[in-house]
Structures are given as structure tokens and as C-alpha cells.
Amino acid sequence: AQKITQTQPGMFVQEKEAVTLDCTYDTSDQSYGLFWYKQPSSGEMIFLIYQGSYDEQNATEGRYSLNFQKARKSANLVISASQLGDSAMYFCAMRELNNAGNMLTFGGGTRLMVKP
Amino acid sequence: KAGVTQTPRYLIKTRGQQVTLSCSPISGHRSVSWYQQTPGQGLQFLFEYFSETQRNKGNFPGRFSGRQFSNSRSEMNVSTLELGDSALYLCASSLPSISGANVLTFGAGSRLTVL
């Protein structure tokens, strides 16, 4: 069974500094996708970045990058130049592609707090 | 374009009642998924509908049910509410493709409180 682990319940970062949010996953499938979502206090989940298991390069989207280490089964999110608006819950999620559907398995989340 | 719309945003029910939540997906999205979010259990997959058919189902009791209409709008129903059903219920829609990069777009959720 697939599993996502986020070991940092909460983190502080100083505004304008970079921060890494950890995510490890467990799956027996060779073909899968990894996602990061941001959830502000309003509740809506906002898609940030995607990494496919066969992608050779780490994904980047603006200030977000994904440090993908397949052998270690980790997919850490790096946020550069943190902003106050980055304060939110962050969730790592996985989809196994042998499943004929769009089901995501989520980690427990990390609450990021950006200090001015 | 309009995002995923969930109604109602907030509701309060008492134990034993039933509740129906609605989700209107992004235009053109035919897959609709539902998730339950609680402080204790986190985000858990409830079910997914595609072209009016349930494609996947999570590990929830039969009190939780859903359906999808021909216009892709979806509803979920919880019968005989229990205190533990208090949660944020999130709906997500996506394109029909099941490729890895297919992104789920979430609504703002329906926050259910059971008293």
C-alpha cells in the first residue's frame, strides 16, 4: 500500500530565506506521480508542483522546486525567498499510475510559518 | 475560468441526521473526487466519479455515498451522521486523462459540524 510521510509537523522560516519541507513515500509501483499542495487557512488546496517518477530532472515552478531522490524515495519541496503569504499547510501527495483513476494519497502535512 | 464550486460552505447538523454536499467541477472536467479532512485522520480519499460512474472508493462505511450527474456535477451524501463525521469535505475535479501529470483542482470545501 502506498504511504506518504511528512516528518515536520511545523516549521518556522525567516522571510526571504529558503526552506525545505520533507516528504518520503512508499510504493511498490514503478510508475507514479508526486504532488505538493498548499492549503491556506481558507481551506482550499492549491497545486504547487508535480514530479513524475520517470522524470529525470527535478521539477521547478517559480519559487518552488522539488528535490526528487528516487532511490531514497523522497520528494522534498524547496521554497526559495519565502514570503509572508507562504504561511500555510503544505501537503505532499502521490498517485500510483497503475490505478485507473485520480486518487491521491496525502501525507499528514507541514505547517509553515514565515516570520517577518 | 470558474474554479471548483462547493456548496454549502458551512453547515451544522445533529447526530442521526443526513447531509448532502454539492460540487460543481471546472467546465470540461469529467472526473470528480471527494476527500475528508479531519485533524486526527488528515486527508482521506472518499470516492471518485467519472462519467457518472464510481471509479474508485476509499475505506469509508456505506453511510457515505455519492453520485455524479450528466453535467459532471457531483453530490455526496452522509446518512445517520456521527460526531466523527465533523470535517472539511473537499471536492476536486480533473480532466479525464489519468496521466501522471493530471492535476486535481480543489474547491474551498464544505465544513460540516455534527453536534
Image (tube, coloured by chain):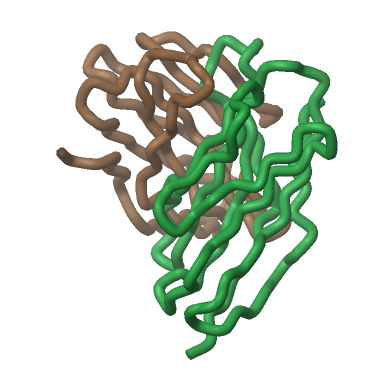
Chain colours: A green, B brown
Image x and y of residue A88, in percent? 51, 67
Looking at the picture, does residue B113 appear above or below residue B85? below
Image quarter of residue B73: top left
Q: Residue at x 28, y 20 (%)?
A: B72
Q: Residue furthest left?
A: B1
Residue A86 in the figure: left or right of residue A69: left
**Looking at the image, is A10 positioned above or below residue B74?**
below
Q: Is residue B45 among the parts visible in the rendering?
A: no
Single out the residue that lies furthest toward the front. Answer: A57
Instruction: Please state which of residues A96 and B39 is positioned toward the viewer in this rendering.
Output: A96
Front position in the image: B112 or B29: B29
Q: Which residue is farthest bottom? A: A116
Q: Is residue B106 above or below residue B110?
A: above
Q: Is residue A27 left or right of residue B39?
A: right
Count how many numbered circles sit on residues in the image. 0
Residue A108 at what x, y percent from top left?
70, 53
Residue A79 against residue B82 in the figure, above or below: below
Residue drawn at point x = 56 percent, y = 84 percent? A14
The quarter holding residue A13 reads bottom right
Figure quadrant of the N terminus of chain B? top left
Q: Residue at x 64, y 79 (%)?
A: A12
The image position of residue A1, as x and y in percent, is 81, 25
| Quadrant of the image containing the C terminus of chain B | bottom right
Q: Residue at x 69, y 72 (%)?
A: A10
- Please state the horizontal and vertical placement of residue A69, each as a whole percent of the image: 75, 39
Question: Is residue A7 visible in the rendered structure shown here?
Answer: yes
